[in-house]
Image (cartoon, helix red, strand yellow):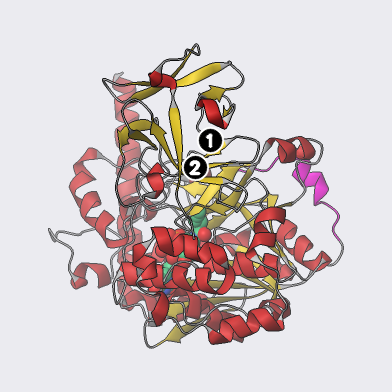
């Protein structure tokens, strides 16, 4: 025990000594900073100290000052191979303060080298599948940012450079959407001059939002392919080739990687599911859903091939540059954040293109629980204004469904100038939203003319079935459906769809589940809801409003009324 203690003390002492030297060098002159080889022999990129790193902060609350300070964090060496960063309890208070700046653990991020290693999370088969590729087109990488932290932004850039074949990178374009932080100005311009891939920073002198910022980048890009990334990503080995292969085979194919998870507290890297696809709920919020049984079976033999998805998450994808513009680039009247991912997804599918996910391409994204930046004009008006545009231009009669149950969006619908986008839809001779639902997403849970849509009312108590509420910003509802008094104004959480063959669904928990299979209504007249695999009936426990399945009886607690609600 004693020996261990002494060894640790010595190590700590040497580390401390080393960092003091480096710090002195740094303070004396900017040019003196040198990359170094850490204790494990890993080359560590320094220079990340220009930014908002954490050492020597003593200010109790965050001020502009804190955010802009030129600070210095000695020898970042944690987070190797995507492992979590551990913060010493003595630093917790400072850590929490710093967390508020970007709504992620900046102290942890600043302890990780800009070029940290990550595990190869691909399936083994991916390596041979992409071993001998012919000529692939070059891509421009476009990263837009607003007040991003130095370490996350530059770790994105270094991960692109280190894990992409050089000959496939035309350039890296950083688009600064009017950030206020000092270190994102001259220091960033200087820093990118020394990178081994041509990198430049474009700047907007007013806040234009991520959609217009991406347009700024795209208009300036020279590559045959455009690849967009958020400003807090980390690309893993082999991420780029699968994307470029898809685009090179057919310019109308738009492709996204599997989006892995960088934890906002520890910065650990977690591989995400490969068999999820992107879709959206009745509120037009993006959702990951598991592939249906048919697709899963189809894919059993070709797990490495790209597959089609109804929608993309939005931040990470590649597409042919000429096709990007031919397809109408982005709706430049969308503001700040939100909705552009669905807009591009609908537009691509309805106008002859496709959206796909390449399961061999893995890129990490830092998921946050809330947004750190301002939404000029209010987050509601921005998001629902954008979504109102999506609905009005692309969703036909389902726009009415959206507005009926989303008063915030409905309030903004008449403010939208959408003529030029409707003209684009006309010019490209795009198909209807009905076609999209039937062909791209046949297992969708939206109401249609041949489905029941409305409330399921308990015959005995006259209460409604209600699904659990959503939690958090990426949150999906979890928990059990319950009985709840019927809310006079129709609410989506009390609405259900029943398909032609009697399967009852909602948008979120997808099926009224018990928990294995779909609930089906046997014959509408008996008003019994049968759980087909168990041959049991849906029953309400009236004293605590819970739902169960039980052997079928003729009792009133198993009787249900399907009460249709007009949906458009
Ligand atoms: O005003 C702004 N200007 C910007 O330049 C606001 C944001 N931005 C930048 C920002 O710095 C970041 O680099 O735009 C990028 C995206 O903003 P985030 O990271 O705050 O967005 P997000 O990751 O929470 O949101 C997802 O949905 C957005 C809807 O507009 C965008 O499509 C994001 O790109 C998208 N992110 C992803 O798809 C990553 C995976 C998430 C999932 C699921
Ligand atoms: Mn993001």
Confirm whether residue 155 shows in the render: no
**Residue numbers of the magenta segment:** 119-133
In the visual, does 348 lie left or right of 31? right
Circle 2 sits on which residue?
Answer: 506
In the structure shown, which secondary structural element does the residue marked by tag 1 occupy? Answer: loop
Q: Would residue 110 appear left or right of 312 to someone viewing this image?
A: left
Q: Is residue 122 magenta?
A: yes
Callout 2 environment at 10 Å: few (<14), some (14 to 19), or many (20+)? Answer: many
Picture coordinates of residue 47, whole percent (x, y)? 42, 67
- Residue identifier under label 1: 511
CB atoms at circles 2 and 1 under 8 Å apart? Answer: yes
Q: Which residue occupies 29% across, 20% down?
A: 2
Q: Quadrant of the N terminus?
A: top left
**Residue found at the far left of this picture:** 60
Mark 1 crowdedness (10 Å alpha carbons): few <14, some 14-19, many ≥20: many
Closer to us: 101 or 400: 400
């Amino acid at each position: 025990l004693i020996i261990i203690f002494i060894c640790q003390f010595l190590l700590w002492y040497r580390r401390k000594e080393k960092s003091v030297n480096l710090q002195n060098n740094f303070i004396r002159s900017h040019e003196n900073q040198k990359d170094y080889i850490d204790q494990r022999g890993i080359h560590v990129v320094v220079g990340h100290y220009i930014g908002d790193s954490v050492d020597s902060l003593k200010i109790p609350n965050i001020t502009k000052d804190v955010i802009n300070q030129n600070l210095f964090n000695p020898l970042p060496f944690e987070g190797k191979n995507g492992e979590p960063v551990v913060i010493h309890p003595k630093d917790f208070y400072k850590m929490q303060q710093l967390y508020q700046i970007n709504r992620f653990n900046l102290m942890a991020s600043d302890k990780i080298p800009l070029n940290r290693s990550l595990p190869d999370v691909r399936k083994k088969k991916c390596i041979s599948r992409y071993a001998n590729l012919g000529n692939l087109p070059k891509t421009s990488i476009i990263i837009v940012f607003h007040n991003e932290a130095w370490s996350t932004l530059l770790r994105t850039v270094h991960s692109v450079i280190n894990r992409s074949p050089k000959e496939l990178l035309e350039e890296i374009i950083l688009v600064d959407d009017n950030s206020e932080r000092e270190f994102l100005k001259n220091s960033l311009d200087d820093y990118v001059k020394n990178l081994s891939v041509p990198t430049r920073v474009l700047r907007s002198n007013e806040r234009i939002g991520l959609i217009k910022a991406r347009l700024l980048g795209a208009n300036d890009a020279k590559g045959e392919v455009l690849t967009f990334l958020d400003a807090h990503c980390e690309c893993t080995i082999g991420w780029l080739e699968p994307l470029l292969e898809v685009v090179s085979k057919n310019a109308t194919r738009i492709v996204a990687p599997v989006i892995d998870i960088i934890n906002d507290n520890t910065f650990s890297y977690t591989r995400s599911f490969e068999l999820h696809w992107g879709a959206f709920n009745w509120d037009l919020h993006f959702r990951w859903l598991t592939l249906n049984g048919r697709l899963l079976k189809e894919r059993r033999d070709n797990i490495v091939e790209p597959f089609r998805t109804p929608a993309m998450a939005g931040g990470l994808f590649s597409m042919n540059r000429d096709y990007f513009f031919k397809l109408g680039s982005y709706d430049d009247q969308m503001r700040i954040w939100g909705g552009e991912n669905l807009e591009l997804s609908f537009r691509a599918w309805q106008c002859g293109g496709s959206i796909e996910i390449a399961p061999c391409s893995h890129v990490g994204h830092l998921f946050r629980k809330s947004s750190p930046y301002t939404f000029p004009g209010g987050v509601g008006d921005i998001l629902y204004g954008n979504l109102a545009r999506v609905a009005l231009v692309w969703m036909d009669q389902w726009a009415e469904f959206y507005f009926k149950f989303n008063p915030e969006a409905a309030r903004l619908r008449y403010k939208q100038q959408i003529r030029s986008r409707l003209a684009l839809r006309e010019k490209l001779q795009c198909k209807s939203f009905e076609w999209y639902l039937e062909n791209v997403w046949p297992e969708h849970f939206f109401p249609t003319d041949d489905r029941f849509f409305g409330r399921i009312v308990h015959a005995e108590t006259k209460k409604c079935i209600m699904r659990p509420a959503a939690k958090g910003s990426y949150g999906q509802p979890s928990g059990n459906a319950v009985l709840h008094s019927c809310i006079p104004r129709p609410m989506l959480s009390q609405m259900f769809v029943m398909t032609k063959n009697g399967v009852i669904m909602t948008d979120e928990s997808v099926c009224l589940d018990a928990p294995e299979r779909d609930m089906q209504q046997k014959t509408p007249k008996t008003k019994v809801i049968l759980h087909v695999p168990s041959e049991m009936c849906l029953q309400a426990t009236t004293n605590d409003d819970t739902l169960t399945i039980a052997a079928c009886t003729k009792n009133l607690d198993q009787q249900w009324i399907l009460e249709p609600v007009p949906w458009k």
